Each structure stands twice: as C-alpha cells, then as structure tokens.
Image (cartoon, grey):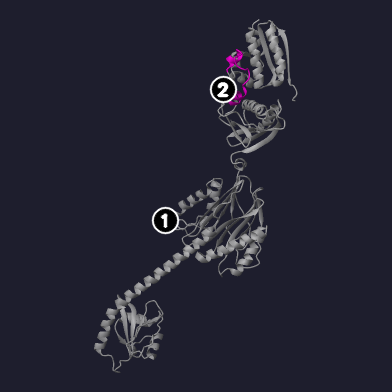
Amino acid sequence: MTENRFDVTTRVEDGRLLVTMTGDVNAGAASKMEEVQNAVADTGLRGVVLDFGKVDYINSTGIALIVSLLARARAANVEVVAFGLTDHYRQIFQITRLSDFVGIYPDKASALRAAPV
Amino acid sequence: MALWRRKSKQVNDVAPPVDVEIVEPVPIAPDDPLLDYLQKLARPIEVEKIEVESPALEEMKAANIELLVPLVTQGELVGILNLGPRLSERDYSTDDRKLLDALASQAAPAVRVAQLVREQELEAQQRERIAQELRVARLIQQTLLPKELPQIRGWTVDAFYRPAREVGGDFYDFIDLGEGRIGVVEGDVTDKGVPAALVMATCRTMLRAAARRFDDPGRVLEEVNDSLHVDIPPNMFVTCFYAVIDTHTGLIRYANAGHNLPYVRTETGVEELRATGMPLGLMPGMTYEVKEAKVAHGDTILIHSDGVAEAHGPNGEMFGFAGLMGLMGAHGHAPDLVERILDELEDFTGPGYEQEDDVTLVVLRRTSTAQEAAAAFMTDRIITEFEIESQEGNERQAIDLVEEAVASIGLPEERIERLKTAVGEATMNAIEHGNKNDPALPVTVSVALDPSALRIRISDRGSGRPEGAGVATPDIEAKLAGDQSPRGWGLFLIESMVDEVSENTVDGLHTVELVMYLEGGRE
C-alpha cells in the first residue's frame, strides 16, 4: 500500500468551519473526508471554508469526495467556499463545474468573509 | 581492265571478256599525282605520253598497260579504265578513243552512283554498329548500378546517374559490410562505350570482393589496383573514391584513387575529403593514403564525377569545382540536393546542351538528431518507458516519472500540470479497471516525442471499455442531488486535459494514448 499522504483538521474560525487539508486528496483521503462530511452536516454552522493551501494533488477520486462533501453540505443547507487552490486545480474546478457550487477565493481572509455565519 | 575506286587503296576487278589477257589491277596510292593529272585531263591518254612522277605509272608500264581512260563526273575522278595493247597489235585509233571517251562519260556517273550507294550502306552499318555498342554499354551500366538505395537508420542516401550519349564509364556502389558499416564507391573509367563498361564491370566485382576481405579502404584500393592492372587495356584506367562509413558513429575512413574530391557540408561550411592515390590500373604496387573524418548529425557528403564540374557553358567556360562547392555551401542541407545541383547545371549549360560525360552524384546525409529520432521509430522517439505495479495510489509514480521525462521539453507549466492530471487518471484506470489492481500485471507507460507532439502511452492487460461506451459528461447537479454517483470523473478529466486521446487493444494490451501538442494546443 502507498503511504497515506492525507491529513485534515477542522476548527471553527470567525463562526465558520475551517477545514484544512494537507497532502493528496485521493482514495487515501476517503475515510478522513467522510469524517469531514459528518462534521459539516453536524456542526450547525452555516458556512464552511475549505483550505486547499497544502494540497498538491487532487485526482478524480478526490473530486468525487469533494462532490460528496458538497452534496452533504447542500442537504444540510450549509454553504461551502474554498481558497488556496493552485491555478491548475482552480481550472479543474471550473471544468468540472464544481466552482458553480463552491465560491473560490484567493486567500483565507476573503474566503472567511464570503462564507455565511 | 580495272576500276580505281574512290577513297580506296583497293582496285576493283571487272569481269574480263572471254579469251582476253587479264590486265592485273594496279594499286594507286590516294596521293599519287597521277590521279590529279587524270582528273584534270578527263580524256583517254596513252601511258607513254604521260609525264608525271608517279609510282603507279611505272607499275602500269610494267604491266603493259597502254591506254588510260579516266572516268570523271562533275569534275571528280571516280575510276580509271586501264587498257592493254589492242588485240590487233595496232595503236588505238581516233575512233577507238572517241568510243572509249563516250563510254567513259556514260559510265562515270553510273559508277559514282554505285559508289555513293555503297558508301551509304557502309555508313548505315557503321551507325547501327555504334548504336548497338551503346545499347550494350548502357545495358552493362544499368545492370550493374545498384537497383535501389540502401536503407540506413539515421542516414538518408541519394544517388543519380545519367549517361552521356556515348556512355562513359561512371559507376557507384554500396556494399553492406555488416555491423552498421557500409562501403561506398564512386568510380569513373576513362574511355567510353563497351570497353569502358566492361572495365567498370570488372572493377566493380573486384571492389566488392576486396571490400569484404579488407577493412582498410587503402588496402582495398591497393588490391583492386594490382588485380586490375593485369587485365585493363593499355591507356585505360579508373579513378575511384572508396569510403567505409560506420553508420552508428558517423566515422568515415576513406581512400581515393585519383577521383574528384568529395565534399562534406558541415554546420559551419564545406570541406573536401582529401586523400591521395594514383588511379587504378595504371601501375602495380601503388599505396593509397587513408584518411578519417567524423560525420556529425546533419552533415552531408557529396561524391561527384567529372560530368558535373567539367560541364561546359555556352561560351566554353567550365562549371568548375568552385561552382559545385558553392552549391554545397548554399544547398548542402537541402533534402533535394541532387535536384538542385542538376537544375543549376542545366541553367549553366543552357538549352540544347549535349552532355559531354556521364553525370554521377552520390549523396549521404547523417540525419539530424531530431530527424533521426523521428525516423528511428517511424514517427516518434521514445524518451522514457517504465512499468509500474498495479496498486492503488501508484499513479503518483507515473506522474512523477512523466514529469521528470518531459522537464526538458519546455512545455508551459500549466500544460505540464494538465498532462500530469491526465497521466494520473489514465494510469488509475489502467491499474483499477484494466489490471484489476493485480500487482502481478504491470502498467506500462511510455513517453514519446515527435516533431509536433508529446505522446504518452499507457498500457494495461485489460480489454478496454466496451465498444461504443462513450464518455458521458458528468452531471454535477445530479451528483449533488444524489441522483448520480459522485464518481465518474476520470475519463472526463483526461479528455479535458490533453489535445487528443485515443485507445486501442492489440494482442491483449490495451493502450490509451494521450497527445499533448508542443505548440498550439488547447488553452
């Protein structure tokens, strides 16, 4: 097995749930991302901010995980924004139309401001 | 009675009357003053009355010839009737001479016509004989020149041969010496026609035999020189350039038996391949200097015969070696170098020029590295090729290795990222769907470069997707609503990332090819 290159932490900042991912968003991230999905649905906060600043690889499985996260958030009436995406992944978010459902911001401050409280 | 035949030292017999003493023909030299005398006189005359210093006249007297009747038509002496003494032993009368004069004036034109017909027949025979010889000479040349050019990886070879009307003795040859080495010959036999063609044939056979026995090109020429010297007709010899080229390294070793110096067009200019040696067949025991040179990628060698440099323009000026060298400087790298030289030659000699000598050109070009790469694999060059184990997550290895392999190509960063994503997705599919995560089955990745594109081929042992299974664009709304699996992004991503995607299955190997244009690809 390849080493697990993914880690994720969640904490509340300015009344939003800040999700900070580190490493590769792929199959290896599945179980941890499932915990995040639960956290997003259960926290009771209206805004979630995804921090991709320390992510350097997202594959199609990772995109599926993000889609699942968005689906759970949507069902729980939670709005999701993101920052820290590289140009390449910002383009992938556009191609996949993920960006129609996740506001993408250049930095943490603007992302936090954009997410509802 | 005898007829003297025009332009001939022979004298024709004419059937004598029965019972008449035969007057022996008397040979007359073409420069005998008697001929000039009789032509001017143009009437019968007794031998005794002729006052000319003439060897023939003395012989006539000795042969008992009494009367000469010149056959003159249109002021030209075409024959002489030699008459011996009259049977009655009396002198020829005035009437006799009138009769003979009348006979001569009637006979002379008829004799002349007969002579002309005979001359034309002989000329026609001569022409036919020459034409036949030329056909034979051409046939020998054509039979012995290479039927096709050698196919050498990393080299392009071109050759041109055009005989002069009187076929000369030019020839060229390529000899496969094994291990990527090739012997290249160009020669020119002095003389023309069948004799030259026969010497060419002999020389070619000797060269082929010697080339297989000796590696050293000088030794090869020595051997041929000694053998040829025994057989070659006097005053004939053969100029010959012989080189052994290691087609892998570009090393050329050559010797020259008095043939024109070949040229090499390098990156910086034109150089001569200069080695000294006497023409083949002149004298035995000659030695031949051997030189070496390195043919770099993109360099072009031109071997040429006299028919080019020694062609004459309308005012008698020669095309010249300097002219040919200049052409090599200007067009040495052109793929159609031979055509360009011939065009220039035609412009120089002007219309209606009859080629004086055979024209032979042999061009050997070591292809440039990029061209070689493309030629070596028909369309592209493999930069790297590797296998990875079919285990989840191993697509990262493929991504890293491909990234490393294409680093020097100079693709924009953004396009490299797209390529990495596509490689990752295709490799994941190969691992998961093609090889079913079986570590025993490898995924093969090759990275190839052609002049216009990067081609990444990813192969697994699966059968590919079922026929007609198109790539559905994932519906994000349906996925968010839970009506569609959140998965299913792989092929969509691949197609979005690169300029072309194709797949095929051959012999149990399913391959997806990702094509990224080097320029002008999708934004």
Give the vertical position of B256 relative to B68 (above or below): above
Identify the secondary structure beneath mark 2.
loop
**Can residue B397 be seen in this snapshot?**
yes
Q: Which residue is mark 2?
A: B472
Foreground label between 1 and 2? 2
Q: Residue at x 41, y 69 (%)?
A: B125
* Amino acid tagged 1: Gly
Count neighbours of disc 2 (C-alpha within 10 A) and say few if under 14, some if 14 to 19, many if 20 or more: few
Quarter that holds the C terminus of chain A: top right
Give the SS element for disc 1: loop
Left or right, B50 with reference to B445? left
Q: Residue placed at 56% from the left, 25% from the top?
A: B470
Please, what is the three-letter code of the amino acid marked with disc 2?
A: Ala
Q: Residue furthest bottom?
A: B89
Magenta residues? B475-496
User: Who comes first in sequence, dot 1 or dot 2?
Assistant: 1
Disc 1 to disc 2, how far (Cα)? Answer: 70 Å
- Residue B485, magenta (yes or no): yes
Q: Chain of mark 2?
A: B
Quarter of the image holding residue B459? top right
The answer to whether one can see residue A114 in this image is no
- Residue drawn at (74%, 21%) of the image: A5
Q: Is residue B235 magenta?
A: no
Mark drawn on residue B325: none
Chain under disc 1: B
Residue B123 placed where, x, y %? 40, 70
**Which numbered disc covers residue B352?**
1
Describe residue B50's horizontal placement relative to residue B199 as left or right.
Answer: left
